[in-house]
């Protein structure tokens, strides 16, 4: 009996060790994305974060995955960039006791849809804003997507070494344009030529540049009372007076930091710095690992899935085609939502109702990728795929789950796609199908005549599609202009509702199905969309496919 009891106890303690280890692994993960308008400093900040994490040894090691404007007709450049973007898709590193996964997002606006989808896999976001330019267009769009999901957001105001907008004006602009409730956790001392450093309100410390050398930073100095006369010894009489005034105003005007409001997306902490000069980055990182969430629960059609559940589940948020046309395999990026993902273990591909196992799942680090045996919630694994996956697919230990939250957004550009080589119709169909699964663009089929329409976020994609169809699938396509303003997903109380019947009759020319077979209205102008909405109040016209 004693032996049996001992055995039971040892098994129990083994179980608790595994469980504890599993929970520790989850709680030490921080999976996030950095978003910004191009040129605000996203790549520079990413690089500096990696330097702090010891993941790279020198600046310049992270290649920008920016697709430069000149790439429009330079396909080699696009191909080169595709290579870079797979290399920098996930940048994992360790900092203090945390494992940090940065999910990289393309800056080019033509690839915004890719960024939207990557944002479905992050647990929090850092928004980079250029102090001189303030809130720019692309930032507004991306933040809107984050706010749809109440993602916790931290703001980093960059390039303080340059002349820019007054800090308070900028905070106002951020609140107004992005709908934030900001809480400054650091505040700049001077700006541009006079930029001396920052006061860290989070830790009540001063961090200054070494006098006369903007590339060297002093150790941070504890300073919990800025009314102390010795402040002037560090930053001079005038700057000390100004800083005291500024901090007084900050404490009067802005609420104090509330971690749960931040986690609910109701409050956004702000940091100031200069990524290029490595300034304010450590403050940001130290606060980030403290306050940013570990992997969050995710909604599925069936139920809320918690990261600490025993059984594995995850979803595909990105698919990257192989660069080598001779091997048509692809890399599907899976975010692990719950349980542990094990190599060589069969998992259920829910949409196909098929068990698949993976012999070489990849984990990504800043400077390399490697085959991993075990991954935890928050991690991203890259799975080699021969055409089984499309964006939004769910993998589980066996449960039939379908994760929500990878909507399609209305494209901005629409064109008919035609087959330019009748001998290659099959190749064209296959190519279009696979490129759409990868999320390169969206395909709509007109109800009236079955013609295929490609919708993209930017004009660049049309060229990418044409090029890839030819080089990867041996098919040729041509485009024909089509006047569409927006694609709207239609919600009707029932399909035999009199308003829907009338709408479908009057607008039959403009009705199409998306790739999932959902009904879409291709409105030809903003005016016609508005009129349609007014005429058929029982119908709802959604700008995204998930409502
Ligand atoms: P992005 O990924 O958001 O598009 O921006 P990226 O980091 O590439 O930065 C855009 C430009 O801004 C780069 O200059 C970069 O050096 C500069 N930059 C980033 N952070 C700071 C900062 O804190 N202060 C100043 N003054 N500049 C900053 P570039 O000339 O376009 O490129 P490069 O030749 O320096 O690489």
Image (tube, rainbow, N blue to C red):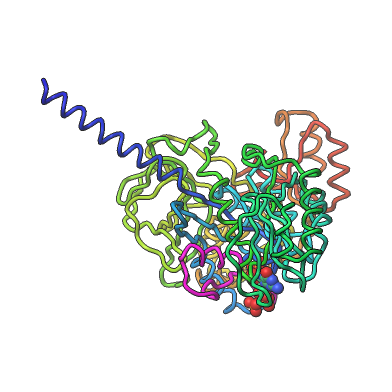
Q: Quadrant of the C terminus?
A: top right
Q: Is residue 429 left or right of residue 409?
A: left
Q: Is residue 53 a member of the stretch shown in magenta?
A: yes
Determine whether 431 is above or below 377 in the image.
below
Looking at the image, residue 527 lies above or below residue 300 = below
Q: Quadrant of residue 209?
A: bottom right
| Closest to the observer, 391 or 335 | 335
Q: Note whether residue 259 is visible.
A: yes
> From the viewer's perspective, is 535 left or right of 127?
right
- 503 part of magenta stretch: no
Would residue 478 be visible to someone looking at this image? no
- Please give the name of the residue rendered at 81% of the width and 58% of the height, measured from the top-left corner: 241
Q: Is residue 389 above or below residue 262?
A: below
Question: Who is closer to the viewer here, 204 or 279?
Answer: 204
The answer to which quarter of the image holds residue 259 is top right
Q: Position of residue 535 (x, y in %)?
A: 87, 36
Q: Position of residue 59 (x, y in %)?
A: 54, 74
Instruction: Where is residue 480? Give x, y as percent.
Output: 73, 66
| Residue 32, image x, y percentages | 56, 52
Residue 180 falls left or right of residue 65: right
Question: Which quadrant of the render holds ligand 1?
Answer: bottom right
Of residues 168 and 497, which is closer to you in this image?
168
Q: Quadrant of the N terminus?
A: top left
Looking at the image, residue 329 lies above or below residue 27: below
Instruction: Write down the quadrant of residue 76 in the picture.
Output: bottom right
Q: Which residues are magenta?
A: 44-70
Residue found at x 47% / y 59%: 92
């Amino acid at each position: 009996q004693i032996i049996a009891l001992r055995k039971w106890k040892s098994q129990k303690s083994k179980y608790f060790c595994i469980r504890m280890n599993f929970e520790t692994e989850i709680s030490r993960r921080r999976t996030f994305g950095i978003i910004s308008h191009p040129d605000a400093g996203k790549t520079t900040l990413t690089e500096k974060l990696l330097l702090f994490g010891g993941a790279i040894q020198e600046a310049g090691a992270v290649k920008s995955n920016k697709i430069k404007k000149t790439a429009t007709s330079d396909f080699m450049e696009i191909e080169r960039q595709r290579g870079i973007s797979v290399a920098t898709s996930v940048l994992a590193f360790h900092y203090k006791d945390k494992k940090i996964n940065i999910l990289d997002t393309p800056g080019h606006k033509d690839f915004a849809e890719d960024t939207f989808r990557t944002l479905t896999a992050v647990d929090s976001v850092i928004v980079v804003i250029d102090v001189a330019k303030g809130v720019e267009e692309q930032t507004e769009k991306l933040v809107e997507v984050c706010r749809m999901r109440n993602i916790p957001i931290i703001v980093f105001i960059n390039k303080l070494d340059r002349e820019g907008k007054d800090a308070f004006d900028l905070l106002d602009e951020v609140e107004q344009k992005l709908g934030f409730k900001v809480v400054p956790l650091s505040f700049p001392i001077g700006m541009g030529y006079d930029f001396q450093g920052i006061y860290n309100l989070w830790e009540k410390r001063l961090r200054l540049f070494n006098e006369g050398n903007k590339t060297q930073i002093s150790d941070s100095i504890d300073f919990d009372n800025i009314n102390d006369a010795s402040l002037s010894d560090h930053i001079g009489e005038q700057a000390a007076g100004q800083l005291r005034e500024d901090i007084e105003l900050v404490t009067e005007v802005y609420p104090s930091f509330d971690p749960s409001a931040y986690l609910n997306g109701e409050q956004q902490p702000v940091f100031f710095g200069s990524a290029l000069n490595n300034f304010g980055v450590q403050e940001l990182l130290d606060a980030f690992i403290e306050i940013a969430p570990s992997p969050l629960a995710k909604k599925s059609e069936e139920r809320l899935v918690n990261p600490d559940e025993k059984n594995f589940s995850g979803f595909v948020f990105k698919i990257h085609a192989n660069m080598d046309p001779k091997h048509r395999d692809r890399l599907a990026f899976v975010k692990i939502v719950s349980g542990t993902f094990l190599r060589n273990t069969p998992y259920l591909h829910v949409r196909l109702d098929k068990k698949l196992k993976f012999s070489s799942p990849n984990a990504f680090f800043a400077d390399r990728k490697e085959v991993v045996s075990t991954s935890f919630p928050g991690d991203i694994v890259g799975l080699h795929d021969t055409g089984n996956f499309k964006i939004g697919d769910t993998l589980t230990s066996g449960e039939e789950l379908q994760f929500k939250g990878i909507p399609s957004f209305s494209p901005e550009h629409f064109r008919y796609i035609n087959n330019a080589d009748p001998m290659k119709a099959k190749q064209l169909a296959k190519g279009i199908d696979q490129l759409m699964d990868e999320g390169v663009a969206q395909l709509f089929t007109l109800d009236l005549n079955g013609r295929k329409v490609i919708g993209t976020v930017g004009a660049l994609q049309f060229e990418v599609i044409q090029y890839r169809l030819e080089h990867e699938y041996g098919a040729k396509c041509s485009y024909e202009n089509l006047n569409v303003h927006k694609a709207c997903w239609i919600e009707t109380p029932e399909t035999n509702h009199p308003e829907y019947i009338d709408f479908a009759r009057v607008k039959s020319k403009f009705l199409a199905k998306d790739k999932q077979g959902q009904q879409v209205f291709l409105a030809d102008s903003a005016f016609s969309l508005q009129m349609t909405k007014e005429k058929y109040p029982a119908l709802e016209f959604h700008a995204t496919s998930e409502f």
